[in-house]
Image: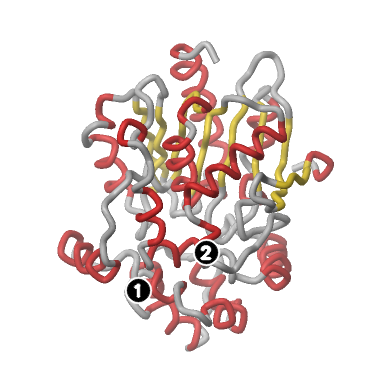
Amino acid sequence: MDESLYKDTVTSRGLTYRYYHAPARDGKPTLLLCHGFPSTTHDWRRLVPHLQEHGYGIVAPDMLGYGGTAKPTDPAAYVPSMMSRDLADVLDAAGVDKVIAIGHDWGSKAVSRFVNWFPERIIAAAFLAVPFVPVTPPIDFEALIEMQRKALGFETFGYWLFFSEPDADATIQAHLDSFISVLWPHDPALWRTHMAPVGALKRSLLEGFTAPLPAYVSPADKSAFIETFRRNGFAGPTCWYKIMTSGMSSRDDQQIPPEQRFPPKRAPLFFGGAKNDHVCLAQTGYAAFRAEPLKEHSVTTKEYDADHWLILSKADEIARDLEAWIERTVLQKSSL
């Protein structure tokens, strides 16, 4: 990604955001790309060249807590209503009105709430690995873990509790090689044993677990990650989890007007499921789009033979599928 296309802006609540902006050409729409944890815009590096080459505009911010964007350590700064306003401010700074919003991992949650709070700025929305996240009533996080055990037979979000501990940042920093070995698993099934269960990730770090990295992560990728997070830390990024386990995010969501709690029916949706993701289960994502009221929407689903990091390992395939969806479905339904 061209370093000269990065810009900074200050949002209406006084936070600096760094974002990548390539203007659209030939009447093509602009894509808002929202990355997840623990990442920066660098995660889009294999998708952006293809999309940009075909004329699509790109606005890709370093999300709050990451890269060149502000990194507050108070979880209250990360509630979805405020971050949605930030994204709208970034688009305003870029001179972009409406977008096709695309999210991966926690970026899918960010896109979900942007759709809720600013439906008038949405042409369509795409979700990778994680589906649209609906508004739900506040629930005790321990109760949610128990519901997962009963429904699935295992825990998928147990590591959220570790990320919510006050010293999680220091623990990760002190065991960064182990963290990377779990984060990018050479065997996707490692997430079932070394990350997802309650206590498993922290134990993996403290015991010094290491393993080979998958082919989609080069030595240069690993070095760039280490350099970035040695400098920036994880105190900001883990706030994305703290607002969930504390119920802060759910309470904030209750402000969303009932008529805006799902995407507008005029906006086509895309879901890319990761077949080998053992935490963000593809079948759960498909079920979400088959449920009321999303089943009434125009939904395109694709499955990728990939783990959670499909935007790294299957970037070319995803770029082609997104372009086909935009050209054949989105632009056929929208006048932009």
Residue at the spot x=35%, y=59% of the render?
278
The quarter of the picture where the C terminus appears is top right
Residue at point 42%, 47% (across, down): 129
Location of the N terminus by quadrant is top right
* Nearest to the observer: residue 4 or residue 79: 79
Residue 5 location, quadrant: top right
Give the residue displayed 40% in from the left and 29% down from the top: 269
Kind of element beneath mark 1: helix
Identify which residue, 133 or 299, lies in the foreground. 133
Which residue is identified by label 2?
184
Q: Residue furthest bottom?
A: 207
Q: Which mark is residue 217?
A: none
Give whichever of discs 2 and 1 has the lower sequence position. Answer: 2
| In-image side of 248 versus 155 (left or right) | right
* Tag 2 and tag 1, C-beta contact below 8 Å: no
Q: Can you give x and y, in whole percent of width and height, for residue 77 in the image? A: 55, 59
- Amino acid on which disc 2 is placed: Trp
Residue 287 at x, y percent in the picture: 24, 41
In the picture of the structure, the residue carrying the numbered disc 1 is 193
**Which of the two residues, 250 or 230, is positioned nearer the viewer here?**
250
Which amino acid type corresponds to the residue marked 1 in the rendered image?
Thr
Percent from the top left, x then y, of residue 4? 84, 41
Judged from the image, the secondary structure of the residue bearing numbered disc 2 is loop
Q: Position of residue 303 (x, y in %)?
A: 38, 40
